Amino acid sequence: ILADEGIAILEWYTCYHTRSEQCGCIKPKPFFIEKAAGEYGIEPAASFIMGDHPHDVLTGKELGVQGLYLLSGHGLKHLSEVPYEIPVFHTLGEGAEWLLQHSSPGTSLPEMIAAGAAAIRNGELVAFPTETVYGLGADALNADAAARIFIAKQRPLEDPLIVHIAEKEDIEALVTRLPEKAELLIERFWPGPLTLVLPKSPAVPDIITAGGATVAVRMPAHPVALELIRQARKPVAAPSANLFGKTSPTTAAHVAEQLEGRYAVLIDGGASRVGVESTVLSLVDEIPVILRPGGVTREELEAVVGEVTVKGWSERPAAGERITSPGMLPSHYAPATPMVLVDDAAVYADDPEAAIILREPTTRHFAGSIFILGHGGTMAGAAAMLYQTLRLVDRMDFRLIVAERFPDSGIGAAVNDRLERAAAGTQA
Ligand code: TXA
Ligand code: MG
């Protein structure tokens, strides 16, 4: 499709020259890119390198070529080595789609960000990428704008929103008190997937906090999100950009699938690389409490502030019950296909109509279809593929989705939490 659009593809180029000149590796070298650029009259600054190894995109970066990183192949294994400014994609197809829509790398994304910032200032909704999942944003200091988020998502007003900021200091205007533990955590984890819950300042409209006395604040690590918030010159309230209770979006296409027509601007910044939402941590009491496990793990938090407790599954309100401790609905993130979460998927080994979601490749036999979240072996890599895989499987008409529980350590706790609530939201 790229060639059909008049886009030249030089995929073979480095391999061909590498072999003929016997340099003994297939890593792209700046020399080859420069040579290709010369021979084909290609302008590096108007070109892209797509690859599933950090070398590919980093070599491109050296020469001013825009890198696109793929999570297929080796991609998941080396994801942590790829700088945040390089967009990532689950598949070659997703990367190619993006390329077709952003074929002038230096301009189209900045234009979308500027349009998004203007829309935020205008009280409209903007869907944008963060490192965790895509958000549906509005001016957090404008109650009418925030109300539009609830309408667009069909979200109950009892469920408060996270306020996103682009500079650490910007939290000061939103809260009445910043305990020392908050400062330590901000220093260590911001920008990043950690949301802090603190007593709210009067500047924050009640609709943001569902009438409560606390506000949730986070500084995302995605460069597109940060630039959007900076240009809007407003804190941006944003829940995940999905219909309430449904699977969260980790690509712009996921957002459009559920919310098309309900926002002014959708900024496509590639796939969200953490893949599960931020950790929501309450600092209201002396001992911090994890209200929602997420991208920053309990172990990482405890290394900075000592004891951290976790709000247990049983303390969360039942579906339909009034939300007293907000946001902890047991049923959430649900696919349309019935789903179960099990310790060992072997229980369903003989079911030909089951989709079996596993963390890593297996030699076990299943009559159904197997979907592997992580080929790279890391739990973070598998988490990055979670919602993408759930959505993919949900479209395929299986009778049942069977997900196997992760180890409960590290980011596995967040993945299990999402799988558990996804399963609770279906009629399996
Ligand atoms: O990673 C994320 O946090 C993403 C991206 C877009 O930043 N956002 C996100 O928002 O997941 P949402 O609305 O889908 O989930 C926010 C969670 C909810 O469970 C909500 O109830 C909780 O945070 N929350 C918000 N404000 C709160 C507060 N004041 N006290 C307790 N929980 C709060
Ligand atoms: Mg959500």
Image (cartoon, rainbow, N blue to C red):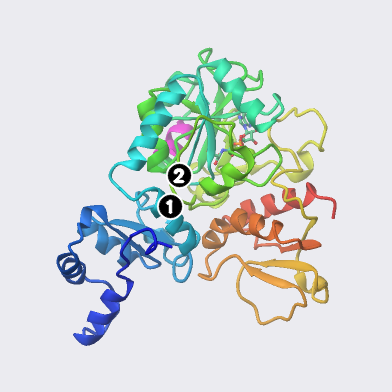
Of helix, strand and loop, which mostly describes the magenta segment?
helix
Density class for disc 2 (Cα within 10 Å; few <14, some 14-19, many ≥20) is: many
* Quarter the N terminus occupies: bottom left
Q: Is residue 235 visible?
A: yes
The label number, if any, that marks residue 196 in the structure image: none
Above or below, comparing residue 342 to residue 326 in the picture: below
Nearer to us in this view, 260 or 296: 260
- Which residue is rendered at x = 21% and y = 59% of the image? 62
The answer to which quarter of the image holds residue 367 is bottom right
Range shown magenta? 180-187
Q: Is residue 29 left or right of residue 348?
A: left
Identify which amino acid the numbered label 2 is placed on. Answer: Asp
Residue 274 at what x, y percent from top left?
51, 52
Q: Is residue 335 magenta?
A: no
Q: Is residue 185 magenta?
A: yes
Identify which amino acid the numbered label 1 is placed on. Answer: Trp
Density class for disc 1 (Cα within 10 Å; few <14, some 14-19, many ≥20) is: some
* Quarter the C terminus occupies: bottom right
Above or below, comparing residue 228 to residue 213 in the picture: below
The Cα–Cα distance between marks 1 and 2, rounded to whole angstroms, is 8 Å
Q: Is residue 279 left or right of residue 396?
A: left
| Residue occupied by mark 1 | 98
Q: Are marks 1 and 2 in contact (CB under 8 Å)?
A: yes
The label number, if any, that marks residue 268 in the structure image: 2
Above or below, comparing residue 199 to residue 296 in the picture: above
SS state under label 2? loop
Q: Is mark 2 within 8 Å of ligand 1?
A: no
- Which residue is rendered at x = 43% and y = 36% of the image? 186
